[in-house]
Amino acid sequence: MQSLFELKTKITPDLTVFECMKEKAIELLSDAEKSEYTQAIVLYSVAGNAYSTIIRNALSEEKADEASLLRKIQEAKDNEISFVLCMWQDKCIDIPSFAFRKSLLELTEKNSESTLFVMTADGVFGIKLSATMK
């Protein structure tokens, strides 16, 4: 896979949506047990709904936190995701795990167009989920 800096599909994201999602991630992390492998995942659907969870240990093989979030989305019949934000405990913004991204694609192929927020030396960018799966 190419590094995020090499991908030519970077887009300038809607910073209003980004700021709201970032605030939610910070709130989730402030209430979570502290671990260097803890992540907050915040999703924003095409229908305008927000979904979020804490991943207690992103390096664990146990994926109950991710599965619970995906179940909520499926139960709401709100499978198409516009934006994805993944924040580590140290407030670094990164793309979620490959397994989680693959699960989003399994919800609906339309999620290949979801925008993942990433932080770079040049600021916040969005990248299409499909570009991260190569």
Image (cartoon, grey):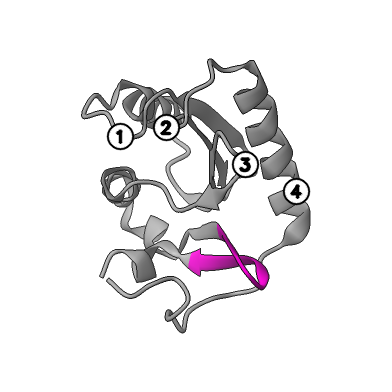
Q: Are marks 4 and 1 in contact (CB under 8 Å)?
A: no
Coordinates of residue 19 in the picture (x, y in percent): 75, 48
Left or right: where does residue 35 sit relative to residue 28? left
- Type of the residue with mark 1: Leu
- Type of the residue with mark 4: Glu
Which residue corresponds to the image point at 66% horizontal and 66% vertical from the top-left? 13
Instruction: Residue 120: give its label.
Output: none
Instruction: Residue 37: give its label.
Output: 2
| Disc 3 element | loop
Q: Name the residue under label 1.
A: 59
Q: Do the residues labelled 2 and 1 touch (CB within 8 Å)?
A: yes
Distance between the alpha carbons at the discs numbered 2 and 1: 7 Å
Coordinates of residue 16 in the picture (x, y in percent): 78, 54
Q: Name the residue under label 4.
A: 19
Q: Which is more N-terminal, label 3 or label 1? A: 1
Instruction: Residue 91: give its label.
Output: 3
Per the rendered image, the range of residues in magenta is: 118-127
Which residue corresponds to the image point at 63% horizontal and 35% vertical from the top-left? 25
Left or right: where does residue 134 sit relative to residue 41? left
In which image quadrant can residue 26 be found? top right
**Residue 57 magenta:** no
Instruction: Indicate which label's residue lies in the foreground, 4 or 2.
Output: 2
